[in-house]
Image (cartoon, helix red, strand yellow):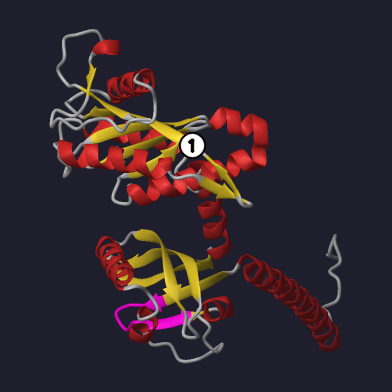
Amino acid sequence: MSDRFPQSPAPSDSEVIADLKAQLDAQAALLRDQSTLLAHSRKIFDRASAAARIGVWECTLPQESLVWTDVVYDIFDLPRGAALDRGEILRCYPVESARELHKRRSNAIDQCSGFSLDTEIVTVKGNRRWIRITATVESVDGVAVRIFGIKQDITDEKILADRNRYLAEVDVVTGLANRSRFQSALGELDAAAGTGKPFGALLLIDLDEFKAINDGCGHAVGDECLKQAGQRIGNVCGGARLVARIGGDEFAVMLGTDLQFADISGIARAIVEEMRRPIVLHGRELQLGVSVGIALVDGCSSAQLFTMADAALYAAKGAGRNTFRIYKPGSSRPLASAVMLSQLGQRPVSA
């Protein structure tokens, strides 16, 4: 009986070989394409890493065998591919940063976790840079076998952040703290309430006759007067916790708890005396004065402290200006009249 479905003849050896060769050629072409794509991706990664100043590192454990990519060598100013010594590298870090890095690294290894740290370094060529370190620990059966991560040069980011912080907290005319920083410091006073570490006194200072100079001589002259006044107040109050310009011609000084009434009165008197000296601009003498209001910390809130200092400032102006007044804590009299000179009998500086 004949077969219903005749079978195709078996391929010859040459046909089998040709088919295998075609498959191998196709696989080789695919591998070449993948290799080309991988090389291209690696080139893009290397360029992106170099542009972002981000390098990769890893360290095998417990051998402590350290490997870096080229960018990390560049960050530390080391020749690419040079032998790495952890002890030598750690000497690039400030002592406290090196200790903190060791602490976080040890904890991460013990807990098979990770960490991050921003720190300044001094490279082997003496260049100062800020870097961000991130790390992740790889473990097998709960045992750390490798720690790896990135190191990024964040110097430009740090400079920009510092610049923004400066602009946010510093008065551009005088170089003193601005109103925003002053308000933050008042908030710190409230946070410190009950801790036994509040500052001792708040001085509010207002320049007398500034408006006349600013309007009559122009804003450029007015700004120079503010600058010199800020310098003088800052010099007198060099040990203060904060010296700030909080308004057009208004300044504030926060003094510490180590000062007695006599010290505070002495500082206020020195400010008044210092501002009695004329300001000389382009050979021209300009006369300013100051009124100073002082409130002593006595368990009050920052808002109450500011109100008391402002009342004392108002009283100083009412007394003829070019003088100071200290708000008397615990007075039961109305706020506007509850202002007196230092209890030590200091007399105000006359106009």
Q: Amino acid at mark 1?
A: Leu
Q: Nearer the viewer, residue 330 or 161?
A: 330
Q: Residue 223 placed where, x, y %?
A: 59, 41
Is label 1 in a helix, a strand or a loop? Answer: loop
Left or right placement of residue 258 versus residue 122 in this view: left
The residue pinned by badge 1 equals: 288
Q: Quadrant of the N terminus?
A: bottom right
Name the quarter where the C terminus is drawn: top left
Give the quadrant of residue 45: bottom right
Disc 1: CA contacts within 10 A as few (<14), some (14-19) or many (>=20): many
Which residue is at 30% across, 35% downward?
A: 188
Q: Residue at x 19, y 32 (%)?
A: 346
Relative placement, left or right, of 37 versus 306 is right
Which span of residues is magenta-colored?
A: 59-67
Would you say 112 lies left or right of 177 here?
Answer: left
Whole-percent x and y of residue 333?
19, 8
State yes or no: residue 241 in magenta.
no
Give the residue drawn at x 52%, y 29%: 209
Can you give x and y, in whole percent of width and height, for residue 37 in the image?
Answer: 74, 71
